[in-house]
Amino acid sequence: MSQPTQAPHKPPFWTIARRDAAAGYIFIAPQLIGIITFVLVPLGLVFWYSLHEWNVLAASFNFVGAANYQMLLADPNLPQVLIASAIFSAGLVILNMSLALLLAVLLDQKLKGMVVFRTLFFSPVVVSLVAWTIVWSFLLQNNGGINGMLAMLGIEGPNWLRTPTTAMISVVVVQVFKNVGLNMILFLAALQGVPKELYEAARVDGASGFKQFRRITLPMISPTILLTSIITIVGSLQVFAQIAVLTQGGPGMTTTVLVYYLYQQAFQFHFFGYGSTLSILLFVIVAVLTFVQWQLRKRIVFYEN
Amino acid sequence: MKTDLSPRMKTALYGLMCILLIPFVFPTWWMITSSVKPISDIFAFPPDLWPRRFDFSTYAQVFELQPFARQYWNSAYIAALVTVGTMVISSMAGYAFARIKFPFSNAIFMVVLLGLLIPSEVTIVPLFQIFLGWGMINTHWPLILVPIFGAPSVFATFVMRQFFIALPNELEEAARVDGLGRFKIFWTIALPLAKPALGAVAIFTFLHSWNLYLEPIVFLSSTQMFTLPQALTQFTDAYGGAMWNIQLAAATMTAIPVLLVFIVAQKQFVEGLAHTGLKG
């Protein structure tokens, strides 16, 4: 951005505002072009594809209008898939958030060696996701480590990954232990940001520990709770590797969540049109959930920084 | 909440935390110890917390059954490229959205934030078609380009923007009076201050790339090109059953280096992440 020489009566073309604008556009250009190329255009395409009957193997690509959406509504597998997704997401969010909060409160106590505990609770976050899932898959085999331990206590464990209820519990729990450390750290930082005077004032007023937690701690960390819950819910809808490695969506279809079903339809059965319709459904669910949570913010979040 | 605790209370808390630690620590322990057990001992009852006999041949087999070194390199160089690329793109965009006034900046920021609502899973079908058109199927390009420029980098841009917004104005004003250009200010003043945020972005981005699973199995088809997560699931016998001890040896080799880096740098790790979350 060289400064052109100018005649004295004419204002310079490259004013500070213009130079700033040029710099701004140059700075954001790579990101914006990337978002257009890899997010917005594909989103338009996925909608366009969803209006087509498209079988890659048969090389057919025919405009069918809303037929895929009618097929979606009539899909006998869809209720099961949505139920599995809902159970997985709800179970994951509730378990993850409450365990994260419990661990954060524990780590916030004045005790020696907390750094060691913090490091160990966080460690699964940095273990490769598929490695972590493979170990759990190994542990959860019918003759695996967990049932071995249970047998030593005289309990006969179920075949975890082959029984509908326990398969769902397993995929949720494996994922919770993998990633709860992230939310734990965010909560811990929020807890440590609560002004100490508030607790002292409450103590003078004779508020119990539990009451302090409900009336001071929770409201003060509510922005963090909102942020982490949005990230956790959206993340829970993207779960794929864990399902693919642990259960392949089974037994039956009990752990076939939406992304896994989408993958099967598009890349195993080669129904790209219907797979795109499922993608649109996933997009709508993510958008609605995020919007609802954002609206709830006004009611739930006590303050915003 | 922060009163000094009685000794009894302290013991109870330590006890509780040790019990809670089991599901976090035991799997990693079990992975490492089982990877050096002979196959006959791997499902032994009662379970051995320490191997009765050692068999390190599994580690050699990992490299015989698959081009594992090559796959390791694939994962490592892709994650490194994606991390550096994302740091560049997102710090520049985050800086501009936070500090530079230009027309439509808020509207453009909203468009970019849309990326948070549109995870790559939603667009995997058209992305496959786009990369097919570009002749990039069974290459690493989709695993490099999409994370750097697409939806995954939006979160990084958001984190960087939140950081730059909090920087005091005076730091830049002095430099602007001296006639420094925007890029100079960004490079010499703003970026060096942003090390904690950059660190958090680097960690998130590296782990995201290192863990990618859906994208590799959609885009890659030859074992030479596979990344680690994909390779780990391929150690199966002729009947499709998992070869557990070999799989666990490969998993151990995948997990341990990152785990070691984390343990050495855990303070920066945790504080970088915490720092970012606060500004949400």
Image (tube, rainbow, N blue to C red):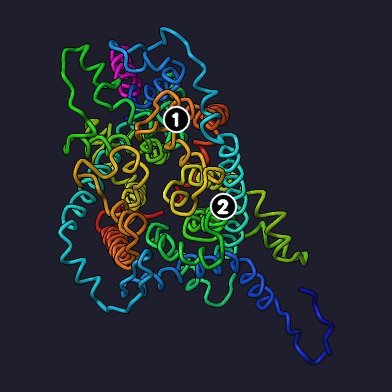
Disc 2 to disc 1, C-alpha distance:
28 Å
- The label shown at residue A123 is 1
| Chain of the residue on which disc 2 is drawn | B
Kind of element beneath mark 1: helix
Amino acid type, residue under disc 2 in the picture: His
Within-10-Å neighbours for mark 1: few <14, some 14–19, many 20+:
many
Within-10-Å neighbours for mark 2: few <14, some 14–19, many 20+:
some
Quick check: B180 above or below B47?
below
Q: Is residue A94 magenta?
A: no
At x 41%, y 72%, the residue is A45
Amino acid type, residue under disc 1 in the picture: Ser
Q: Is residue B6 magenta?
A: yes
- Depth check, front residue: A49 or A39: A49
Q: Residue B65's x, y, as percent?
A: 51, 31
Kind of element beneath mark 2: loop
Tell me the residue that label 2 is attached to: B140
Which label lies toward us, 2 or 1?
A: 2
At x 60%, y 58%, the residue is B89
Residue B136: image quadrant is bottom right
Point out the stretch of residues depicted in magenta.
B4-21
Please tell me whether the stretch drawn in magenta is mainly helix, strand or loop: helix
Q: Please state if B106 lies on the left or on the right of B99 as rendered.
A: left
At x 32%, y 68%, the residue is A273
Quick check: B42 above or below A256?
above
Q: Residue A144's x, y, as percent?
A: 29, 22
Residue B7: image quadrant is top left
At x 59%, y 41%, the residue is B76
The number of callouts visible is 2
